[in-house]
Every structure is written in structure tokens, then in C-alpha cells.
Amino acid sequence: MTRKLNALLILLFIGSGCAALIYEVVWLQMLQLIVGSTAVSMAVLLGAFMGGMCLGSLALARFAAPARNPLRVYAALEIATACCGIAILFGLPFVASSLACAALLLPPTILMGATLPAISRCVRQSSLGYLYAANIAGGVLGCLAAGFWLLRVFDMGIATYVATAVNVSVAAIALLAADSIPAMPPAQSITPATRDLAVYLAIALSGLSALGAEVVWTRLLSLTLGPTVYTFSIIIAVFLIGMGLGSAAGTRIEARARICLGASQLLLIPAIAWAGYMIAQQLPYWDKNLSVHADPWSGFLFDFACCTAALLPATLLWGASFPLALTVAARGGRDSARPVGEIYAANTIGAIAGAVAFSLFAVPLIGSQNAERALIATAALATLALFIREVKLTTVAVAAALICAWLIPPVPWQLLAWGRRMPLEAGRTGNGWKRLYSAEGVNSAIAYTLWIDKTRYFHVAGKVEASSTPSDMKLQRVLGHLPALLHPNPRSILIVGCGAGVTAGSFVVHPEVGRITLCEIEPLIPPASARFFSAENHNVVHDPRTHIVYDDARHFVLKSHEKFDIVTSDPIHPWVKGAATLYSKEYFEACRTHLNPGGLVTQWVPLYDSDLATVQSEIATFLEVFPDGIVWGNLTDMNQGYDVVLMGSTEPIHIDIDAVQTRLDRSPRLAASLREVGFHSAAELLGIYAAQGRDLRGWLAHAEINRDRGLRLQYLAGLALNHAGAPSIYVEIESRGAFPEDIFRGSPAQMGELRKDFQAWRTNPF
């Protein structure tokens, strides 16, 4: 057809790809709210998403006759996709299970998968690779637009409306051009005898290795760069850019396409090894992203360069594989929709297998290093499928695979422990740090380390989450002891996030407690914390009152019918992708509904690695649900703000200091647990009071409320992870809090001691 048609179709496919990636980003964020962010649920949903595209690519040739105008068919697919996008925006929140969510995603993904086979009927086969590349280019735009603009500035609703507007615009342009574009003449489809089965096997294995590599490398790169929403957008964008460029290059090759397809699979062997080497041995030691404090956007550019340096060779080859396979498969038949759909389906089936196998099994069972070796083996198998009769080439492929697999370096345990801070905290040799244990779980990478002074640290997602340092121990014990002492009879407890188990263990020494429910997303953590922090956590994991639930905490809270006297939440930092769901207004409302009358909820809020807007958003969101909430401070030994604890209740909070002291006096084990972190009396403990909700209303007047529909907190926090303003943020809070005469009551002696300690914490916390 004419260049004008090709240019028009490229424009349409850019728009179609852009809308598709916006939908994908939005839907995955919505699904996290419904079914949780465990690897199992995400693998099921990703499989459904890609499975729908596979079905669509196969169904088009069977249900749409070749005589139909391709542009009209394409326009109908785009309009139907837009309708599904709106339906999912309003319907998905009412769906309760993973399977139901997957079923709801099938219609739009089937429609998306049918677009390329539909349009293949009005272009030459040699142009299809350009359309595939254009679709990927649109995906890059959609991924970056959703991650850096639409969801950061607006919410999931606006992002969906933008995507549907793109769908409708693309459909309108296609309809306007449809009358001037004749369809390709109808013809018989290719017969099974003309299919080159080796090509189908090779392109399926190529899809398997591509998605498997995306799983493995996204996990590792998110540690190196910091697992923010921006990092994930950058990684996906680089993957798509490489595949788009490779697809455009592969389209230009028509002669000896089968040999070139085999060569691309052969070259993937060293390209995968190169990525493994860069990710494990080079990028973790580049600390430029830590030096960008004032301008996070410069850091994002550096992260983009890092990802490109590691991933571009392999992604170019994966991108080239599809048009090369298409060129081979399309020979011998006249209805191009059928081979296009079949190659697309084979590639997608492989991709589904790769995503599920590597996220659920390969990485947690054999580790990233061996998973990368499996990727090399997969590329070698694809090469052998195409060159099985070429002895020299098969020998080269096997030899290259063995050498490159042997050269794949292990992932440094320091990367699992410190992630992006590895160059500062550990360096290449460890500098006094000792590894106690590290592992890559289904949902998170974890590590336990020992510093030279025998201080132990627990790391998850590439950051320290708990430790035996005085500041951390004090915070972890306060999260448990404070609500347990202020509640008159705490019987049932829910702890969100195990960590080192210290917060959960704080409840062990309270004799009134009858049941401790510990909700943790990563199954590796509780047994490891029981091993390395048993003294600090009072051996809570093995306490007969402890019941461990392995689930996404938000999903558990929303689906459980159990009520609790205390809910205490110590999630990971909100700049970690997915954590903002545990800081949203809707999550706090769910916690409130799960409290018994007079129940208490405590929430950790970090001040470090945050800026003022981020902290204000967290506190304001909590106070939207618990307007009479209290802020309790946690200071370092330099009298600087470190983090705070928020406390809310179903009723106004009133504290009897004498009653708290009596409970301490009755339980020597409880008193000892508090003395270990510097609290020798009720007055000392309660003296960490900083402010209450009414003190902070003016200060929070313009704060961003973190709601499920937008989860704006993760975008705010992701821009602030290099900030070091904790002391000044705490001063902002503390300066607005006066001694709360309406909250505390007690004997004159106890009130006097409380006033003294209240003032002491503002001058010298130790």
C-alpha cells in the first residue's frame, strides 16, 4: 500500500499502544487494592492480561472475514476497548476475587490482542514489523505518561479517561480513512503443512525468556535504583524502547529471515550474560543517583541510563525476533491475519509461561543467578530449534550457553541488604558488616546482617526495616507497648508486617493478651526473624498465642471478619511501590471497622527519607479517619526527629497515668521490656507525646489526602527519598503541640513527673 497509509497506521498504532499501557498500569494498581500485591495474585492477573491478548490474536482470523474492511474492524475494536476501560474503572472495585478480576480483564485484552491481526489485512507483510514497533513506541509513551504524569498529578479515573479518549480518537481516524482503503483480496488461509513449527517454538521460547528476564531484572534493578513507582516505569519503558527499536530493525530484513531469527536467539545468550554482569557487578556500585538531592528528575535520567546500559542489547534482539518470525511464518499464505495471530499467540503464550515461572518458582527456588542461567538455556533451546540440522551452529550455541552461564555472577548479598545505598553502607568488601542470612523470596528479597559492634539489622526490599539499635528498638516497642498499656483490656491484637518481630513481641509480655495475629506478605521473614531476633521479639513467632497469616495486609484487613482491640501497622516506607496502600484513607477506615469498642490503632510514619509534603500527607490522611489522633515522637540520641507513631481510636482518648504505672508495677517482665529501650516509668513513656490532631489542623490544611483512587502518596514519597529533613519536620510537628491537659489525668505527683518528662524529651531524650 502507499506510504500515506503506512504513516497513518503507524500513528494509529502509537495511539493504540499508548492507551493499552495506560490501562495496564491503572488496572494493576486497581488490582493491588482488591487482591493484594503478592507475587501469586500478580502472576495470575498478568497471565490473564496476556492470555486475553493471546486469545484475541487467534480469534480475529476465525471470527472476522477477510472481506471486511480492516480499518472498520480496527475502529470497532478500539471503541469496544474504550467501553471496557470505562466499565472496568467503575466495576472492578466491586469484584472480590482474583479469578473474577481476571475474567473481567479478558474482554478488553482480547480486543487489544486482535488489533494487529486485523490491520495486517490491509498492509504488506513487510510493514507489519513497523506497526508492531509503533505499538511498542506508543506503549513507552503510555507507560511514562501514566507513571510520571497522569497518576502523579491526577488519579486512576483521569488516567482511564485519557486512555479512552485516545481509543476513541484512533477509532475516529480509522473510520474516516476506511472508505479510501480497500481490503486485501480474500484468499484461503495457510494450511498446517506450510507452518514452520520450529519458528513457532523459537518465538514462544523468545517470549518466555523476555518476560522471565523482565521479572528477574526488574527485581534486581529495583533494588539498585530504589523500588519506587518511577523506577518500575523507567524499567518497563527501557524494555519497550529496546524491543521497539529491535522490531523496527527486524522488519527491514526479508531475505534469510529464518537464519536471522536463529542468529538473534544465538546472540541473546551473551546479551543475557551482559545484563546479568552489569546488574550484579557494575550498576550497584554507581552511586550517582544518591548524589542528586535537590532534583529527583536528574536522578531519573541517571536511572534511565543505567537500565539502558544493561538491558538494551537483549531487548533489541527480543524486539527483532517477532518481525523475523512473522516474515517466515507469513510465507505460503494470503490471509496474513492468521499467521500474524498465530505468531503473536505463540510469543504471548511463552511470555505468560515466563512471567509465571520466574516470578513464582525460579527466583525464590534457585535465586536470580541461576534464573539468569535458565534464561540463557532458554535462548540456547530457541537457537537449537532453528539450527538443529546445522552441527557447527548447534555446537557454537551449546558452547556459548555453557560459557555464559558459567560467567553469570552471583547477586551480591550487600545489594539484597542495602539496595541503592550499597555503595555508601557496605562498599565492595563489607567494611565490618557480616552477612547472617539473605534470600530472595516470592515477594521480597531479605537479609539479616551483623555490624562489628554486634548490632543486628533486618533488611527488606533493599533497605533497613528494623534493627537492634536504640532508636529502632524504642520505636518498635512503642508501637506495641503504648496501645497495649492504654487499652484497658487488650485481648486480641493484629500486627501488620512482621519485620524483626519486635513490635509483635511487645505484646507477649502483656498478660491480658490472648491472641496475636501477625500478618506478613513474605513467608521467609517470620522464621528468619525468630532465628536472629528472638531475644528482642520475646520469641513471639513460637508463642502459642501467635497466629501467622501470610497475605497482603490490606487484603487481609478488607476480607477478614475478625475484630481486634489493637491494630498496629509498621509497613515499609511509602516510597516503596505498593506500600502506599497501607497509608490510604480507605485502609485506615477498614482498620477502624475492625476495632472493638474502645480499640486503638497505631501507625508508623517515617520522617527520614521524606520531605514535608510526604509526611503531611501521611498524617493528614490518618487524621481524616481518626480526627482525635495523637502523634508520639521518636528521637535519636542527637535529639533529632527520626520517626513518629500515630495513634487513633474509635472514641476520644483519655489516659490515666496512675493506671499505666500500676500495670507496669504488676508485671516485672513488661517493665523490663520498656527499661531495655530507656523507659523506666509511665511518665517517661508518655512523655514522648508530641501533638494531637486539633493542634495540627492548620498545618495540614493543604496536605494531600492519600486515597485509593490515586495513591498519590507513593508519587510524593518517590520524589523525596533522597531528602534528609527529618529533624526539621519533627520540629514542625512538636512546635504545634502543647501539653494536653484534656488527655492526661493522674495524681499530682504523676502529672508533675509527666510534665517534667514531656519537657525533657524536647531537650534531651536520653
Image: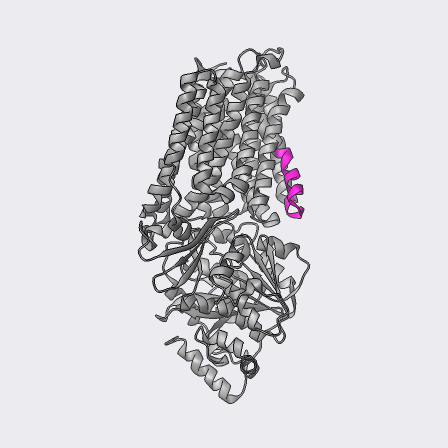
Q: Is residue 651 magenta?
A: no
| Residue 753, x across and y down, in percent | 46, 84
In this view, 269 is above or below 685: above
In this view, 675 is above or below 175: below
The residue lying at 48 percent from left, 80 percent from top is: 681
Whether residue 486 is visible, yes or no, is yes
Which of the 4 quarters of the picture holds residue 373? top left
- What secondary structure is the magenta-colored segment mainly? helix
Q: Is residue 407 left or right of residue 208?
A: left
The residue lying at 43 percent from left, 31 percent from top is: 315
| Residue 301, x across and y down, in percent | 36, 42
Q: Nearer the viewer, residue 80 or 764?
A: 764
Q: Nearer the viewer, residue 675 or 404?
A: 404
Q: Nearer the viewer, residue 514 or 403?
A: 403
Whether residue 705 is visible, yes or no, is no
| Residue 744, x across and y down, in percent | 54, 80
Extreme-right residue of the structure: 561
* Quadrant, the C terminus: bottom left
Magenta span: 92-108
Colour scheme in use: one colour
In this view, 621 is above or below 321: below
| Residue 349, x across and y down, in percent | 57, 30
In this view, 336 is above or below 707: above
